[in-house]
Amino acid sequence: MKMVTDILDELSWLACEAMLPGGFTRAGDGAEEPEGGLVSVIGFSGDRVRGVLGVTAPPEAIAATHPLAGTEPALRDEQLYDWVAELANQLLGRIKGGLMDYGVTLWLASPVVLRGVSVRIVPRPEEGVKKFSLRGRAGDLCVWVDFQFDEALELERVPDHARDHCVAGEMLLF
Amino acid sequence: MGKKVLVVDDSATVRQQVRLALAPSGYDIVEAFDGEDGLSKAREHDDIAIAICDVNMPRMDGIEMIKRMRADGLAVPIVMLTTEGQPALIKQAKEAGAKGWIVKPFNAQLLVKAVDKLAR
């Protein structure tokens, strides 16, 4: 059985790579958060896992990930602030969907944008905070996740035929 | 004037994405930034053909908004557009009166298909 931390890492990377368009690749440990980055955080809780996910990146990198990039002459600051919050929300949504494959349900809080601050993520491994850095043409983007879970937690994948939740991009009409 | 679509989401980016997806098909968009605002706009515009609504929003969530709309006698078809995908929430929305559920990020063609099918 896979370690819980390995599963959480895998789901986090999958979420990052799915949400961020081509042009972002995994960066090594040397990636650093620049001054003046945009920052958003979103909390989550469940009966077995809880924590926080955050996103930080320079405005140019956030603009490059914006779904409307290229459709407007230039994205305004408020559009970037709005998107960095929604990006955190959708990243966590994907992780949430992945955890449902293991029978774990999370409840998401509303994302929050931290205005006027820069953040440097220095994870403390003993506390289980993980940093996921991606390198893009417009700058590096950092996602960090603090998963808190009981040491006794084991994650076992729900068989495909028993899966009854919806995942990103799916539509149901009743 | 095209059919009117009420888009309820606390993210301006998502509201704009939905607008860009639906406007080329001739739909007119009315935006609301949370469930409370969505309920107010639904009461104000009696010609809303369909609503696209997030679930997790400040002040009033999307499922509560549906319940309040139905209690007001507003029969507008509503499709949820959300990061959520758990069966219990989908069931709640369906029982409250939702007609569909889409998990973000959405496919624009699927959204147009749903709106074309359900808009009254």
Image (cartoon, coloured by chain):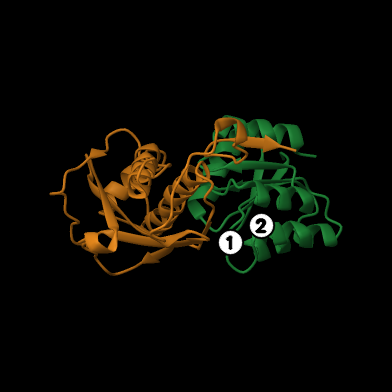
Q: Is residue A30 left or right of residue A102?
A: left
Return the mark for residue A165: none
Instruction: Confirm whether residue B31 shows in the render.
Output: yes
Q: Is residue B21 left or right of residue A27?
A: right
In this view of the protein, which residue sits in the foreground, A107 or A149? A149
Asked if labels 2 and 1 touch by Cβ distance under 8 angstroms, the answer is: yes
Residue at the image position 48 percent from the left and 50 percent from the top: B13
The numbered mark 1 sits on a residue in which chain? Answer: B
Identify residue for label 2.
Answer: B62
Q: Which chain is orange?
A: A
Rendered colour, chain B:
green
Residue at the image position 27 percent from the left and 69 percent from the top: A117
The numbered mark 2 sits on a residue in which chain? Answer: B
Residue at the image position 67 percent from the left and 51 percent from the top: B88
For mark 2, give the secondary structure. helix
Identify residue for label 1.
Answer: B57
The location of residue A126, given as percent across then percent down, is 24, 62
For mark 1, give the secondary structure. loop
Mark 1 and mark 2 lie on one chain; the one further toward the N terminus is: 1
- Give the quarter of the image for residue B79: top right
Mark 2 crowdedness (10 Å alpha carbons): few <14, some 14-19, many ≥20: many
In this view of the protein, which residue sits in the foreground, A137 or A93? A93
- Give the quarter of the image for residue B116: top right
Q: Amino acid at mark 1?
A: Met
The location of residue B95, given as percent across then percent down, is 78, 51
Q: Amino acid at mark 2?
A: Gly
